[in-house]
Image (cartoon, rainbow, N blue to C red):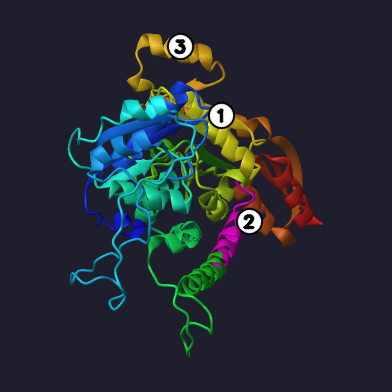
């Protein structure tokens, strides 16, 4: 199912959103989260034709929502609106024959499973009149929360549509946008970790037992075999990813003497646009969620001495799956190990404050929240005078800029350089003629204020960060 969505092979491009508002979620935050799910659906190429929303004290054990809302949801998809009792009817293949031919097919009975959730009878009665399809049929249900495997399966059987929870939607986007080998490995590990507990629910195999060379072990069921294959595949991918991470760590250590800046922020906040504006690089810029998954490192333009390196990182999002955070930890090391963070926030988004807090929460999880930070309110060109004034009051420490304005790009560049200048110190070095390579290192990693040649060697007066000066002094001992 997830692979079909990634490859664009879904049976219908229409989707209906299911939002379940649980205690602790404010109305505005819940509405913003549902709007964001709609943008995620658009990124996957789906047309959102409707929304079904319910407030609950907790997810219903059966399918997440109560019986009334389940029937309303089925009205959008053409399903029965009830969870069948009994074994699931095998899926039919392209030939029209049932998968696992030779086994006796059992018909599913349209009997509703008793709901033990907290939706009251009045709510169920109110929703019971939604059996008729209110609009175009939807072939996919997108749920704005994470479901258990059994809840997703029951929801799928009651609606007759494919069901993707929020984690599955984000994983599908990541898998579709991954380009580099490292990004593909990271996404594949997260995808397999997500699918592993759901193998039994997909109906992909029978639980017959048997043995044989190269097949299942004695007493090993098909689902157990599938899970073992997934575990083995994850182990292989992690071993390959570890080799790539070692190479990336080596590159970061080689850049250790150069000041580094990491662009961080919510997805689609404009980080790649700032990457282009600050470095002149041709990174992909698109008005889509998670358009950037690969870390790109370029020098700040016009170049300075020492060079300042700018890295573009993967965007964050609310309820980012933990498996993705774990898999992309090596990529996000750029944010943890950099000297300065530029936190980009989409000032034109009504949920800008919540998005900024999500970014800070992920940075705390990565251990990067203590790094020096410049806050940039991006897309200022989309704000009117009143919105600009309101943003200035709410974010007094932030820079209200637009990546499309060359003057704003020059201003941010000056602020970045000023931050690094603040931590630099002056020092005088006498480099013996036998160690002239240190002079080259000083020109590459320091700002050389003066240079003179004396009988004992080359005398340099430099300005640089304290750790760089200590390294040069150690080279002279």
Q: Is residue 148 magenta?
A: no
Confirm whether the magenta stretch covers residue 253: yes
Position of 323 compared to 431: left or right?
left
Which element type, helix, strand or loop, lies under badge 3? helix
Tell me which segment is drawn in magenta: 242-258
Label ID, residue 72: none
Mark closest to the chain's N terminus, 2 or 1 = 2
N-term-proximal mark, 1 vs 3:
1
Position of residue 121 measured from the top left corner of the image (x, y, whole percent): 41, 28
- Residue 145 place in picture, x, y as percent: 45, 40
Quarter of the image with the C terminus in it = bottom right
Magenta residues: mostly which secondary structure? helix
Q: Where residue 73 sits: x, y (%)?
A: 30, 38
Q: Residue furthest right?
A: 477
Q: Earlier in the sequence, mark 3 or mark 2?
A: 2
Residue holding disc 1: 374
Mark 3, residue position: 390
């Amino acid at each position: 199912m997830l692979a079909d969505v990634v490859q664009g092979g879904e049976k219908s491009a229409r989707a209906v959103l299911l939002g379940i508002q649980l205690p602790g979620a404010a109305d505005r935050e819940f509405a913003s989260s549902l709007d964001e799910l709609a943008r995620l659906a658009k990124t996957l190429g789906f047309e959102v034709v409707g929304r079904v929303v319910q407030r609950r004290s907790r997810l219903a054990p059966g399918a997440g929502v109560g019986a009334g809302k389940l029937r309303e949801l089925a009205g959008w998809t053409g399903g029965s609106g009830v969870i069948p009792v009994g074994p699931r009817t095998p899926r039919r293949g392209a030939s029209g024959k049932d998968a696992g031919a030779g086994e006796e097919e059992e018909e599913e009975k349209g009997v509703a499973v008793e709901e033990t959730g907290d939706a009251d009878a009045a709510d169920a009665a109110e929703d019971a009149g939604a059996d008729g399809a209110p609009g175009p049929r939807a072939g996919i249900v997108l749920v704005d929360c994470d479901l258990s495997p059994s809840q997703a399966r029951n929801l799928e059987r009651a609606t007759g549509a494919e069901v993707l929870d929020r984690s599955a939607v984000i994983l599908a986007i990541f898998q579709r946008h991954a380009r580099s080998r490292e990004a593909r490995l990271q996404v594949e590990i997260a995808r397999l970790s997500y699918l592993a507990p759901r193998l039994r629910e997909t109906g992909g195999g029978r639980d017959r037992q048997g043995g044989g060379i190269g097949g299942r072990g004695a007493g090993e069921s098909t689902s157990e075999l599938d899970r073992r294959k997934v575990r083995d595949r994850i182990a292989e991918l992690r071993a390959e990813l570890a080799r790539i991470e070692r190479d990336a760590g080596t590159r970061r250590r080689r850049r250790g003497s150069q000041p580094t800046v990491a662009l961080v922020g919510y997805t689609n906040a404009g980080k790649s646009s700032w990457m282009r504006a600050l470095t002149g690089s041709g990174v992909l810029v698109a008005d889509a969620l998670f358009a950037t998954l690969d870390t790109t490192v370029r020098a700040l333009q016009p170049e300075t001495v020492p060079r300042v390196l700018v890295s573009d990182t993967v965007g964050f999002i609310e309820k980012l799956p933990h498996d993705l955070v774990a898999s992309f930890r090596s990529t996000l090391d750029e944010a943890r190990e950099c000297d300065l963070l530029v936190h980009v926030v989409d000032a034109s988004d009504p949920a800008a404050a919540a998005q900024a807090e999500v970014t800070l929460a992920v940075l705390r999880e990565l251990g990067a929240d203590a790094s020096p930070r410049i806050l940039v309110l991006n897309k200022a060109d989309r704000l009117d005078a009143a919105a600009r004034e309101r943003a200035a009051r709410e974010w007094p420490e932030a820079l209200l800029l637009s990546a499309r304005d060359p003057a704003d790009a020059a201003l941010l560049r000056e602020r970045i350089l000023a931050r690094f200048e603040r931590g630099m110190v002056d020092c005088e070095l006498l480099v013996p003629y036998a160690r002239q390579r240190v002079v080259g290192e000083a020109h590459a990693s320091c700002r050389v204020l003066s240079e003179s040649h004396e009988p004992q060697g080359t005398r340099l007066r430099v300005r640089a960060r304290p750790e760089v000066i200590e390294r040069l002094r150690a080279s002279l001992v």
